Image (cartoon, rainbow, N blue to C red):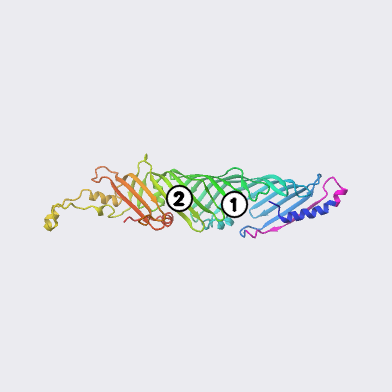
Amino acid sequence: MRFYRPVFFFALCGLLAWAPAQAQSPVGPTLAGELGGTLKALKFSWAPELVWRVELTTVADARLQLQLFADAPGARIQMRVAIDPNLDVGSWTLREGRLDPAIWLPRLAPQLSSALAGAVAEGEIELRGDGVIRGGQLEGRVTLEWRRGAVRHAAQGWALEEIALAGDFIFAQNAARWSSVSPLRLTIGTIATGRFGARNLLVRARMDERLLPQIEEARVEIAGGEIEAAPFTLPLSPPVIQVALQMRRIGLADVVALVPTGLAEAQGLVQGALQLGWSKALGLQIGAGQLDLVPDEPMVLRLASAPGLLSASVPKRFALLPTWLGPLARWAAPLNPGYADLVAIELGRTALKVESLEIRLTPEGDSRGQSARVLIQARPALDGTSVGPVGFEIGVKGPLAYVLRLGAENGATLSLR
């Protein structure tokens, strides 16, 4: 990693002026000067213009001392470099490095996701570092820290509070990229949206020489339980997520509130696994997965009104006489005592105590073209009914990501037929 060319150019000019004087005055400063200008990163059109300045002096041991200053809206960097006249060996210290996320997030947001447009950020981002110069190249360590952070989007109704990020990076001689010394640690105290909330997000990641994050650990508390991700790689240009999630003791009530399931109400816990993907181009992508009832927790649910879901398969009356007897046959046909109870269940009037529940997600579609299927075995929660165990299935057809997004954004429910 080399200095910007203007710095080297100035240092070289200084050396030419300094060499003759050195023979006459071998002790004490013999050269001082200053150079500055502006720099626009053409590769990153979103980046602001950088105003830079370099102060150069020579010191008693004939080394060159450079003070580098760089300023941009919401950013300030100050660096000290001491190097021999051959620009080959020396040391450097990053004395000050600050970024204001309130200014930089609006610039970075379009590069990450259109969903971030309009978001605001706060906190303090600080950079510190030091190292040596060998063969004209920098080696050393830089520490990044974001304190008292937050990101909010009032229009979309979500907020990330109590953000903290810390990590150390190193770069060695002839290394093309930086890499992390130890895992970067990101924590978010609370995550709030209009549909659900989460807390205590923890992510640990390492950066390889390509600055490619390798996520070693990621977990969050949500809906009374926990979701943990298997280790995965997170490309940043463009950002793409493909991750396997393990879900433990998640509240079904929160799932019902978020996802159209055909259930009006649900209490209990589920667990299982799910594949999840996201990209700027395709948005949210739900992969294959399965959720099951947590066996040690009672589960009670109530169906959204679905007339005929259960009652259509059973007679309202029992036919004891042949129909050709007309009124006599109808008079002799007793009512089915379970019919009214089934109607009460399918209309959501009677709650069900669940004995088994299985949610299967097949985004590519199963043999019947269903992208999601809910299998339930249950019995009425109230005693005294004439209905025993009932089993039924809720099927979802169509792109699963669209169905989930419909529920998350509009609060839609699923009609059972």
Q: CA distance from mark 2 to mark 1?
A: 32 Å
SS class, disc 2: strand
Across and down, in percent, residue 243 comes to 49, 49
Q: Looking at the image, which is closer to me, 34 or 88?
A: 88
Mark 1 crowdedness (10 Å alpha carbons): few <14, some 14-19, many ≥20 = many
Indicate left or right for 256 with 278 as reference. Answer: left
Q: Which residue is mark 2?
A: 275
Across and down, in percent, residue 110 comes to 56, 58
- Above or below, 5 against 91 in this view is below
Mark 2 crowdedness (10 Å alpha carbons): few <14, some 14-19, many ≥20 = some
Q: Looking at the image, which is closer to me, 333 or 370?
A: 370
> What's the residue at 83%, 54% (across, down)?
17
Label 2 close to label 1 by CB (< 8 Å): no
Disc 2 or 1, which lies upstream in sequence?
1
User: From where the camera sits, is residue 202 visible?
Assistant: no
Q: Is residue 40 magenta?
A: yes
Across and down, in percent, residue 66 comes to 75, 49
Identity, as a three-letter code, of the amino acid under mark 1: Pro
Q: Which residue is mark 1?
A: 101
- Above or below, 369 against 139 in this view is below
Q: Looking at the image, which is closer to me, 263 or 314?
A: 314
Indicate left or right for 310 with 68 as reference. Answer: left
Identity, as a three-letter code, of the amino acid under mark 2: Gln
Which quarter of the picture shows residue 388?
Answer: top left
SS class, disc 1: helix
Q: Is residue 192 magenta?
A: no
Write down the region rendered in magenta.
Answer: 20-43
Quadrant showing the C terminus: bottom left
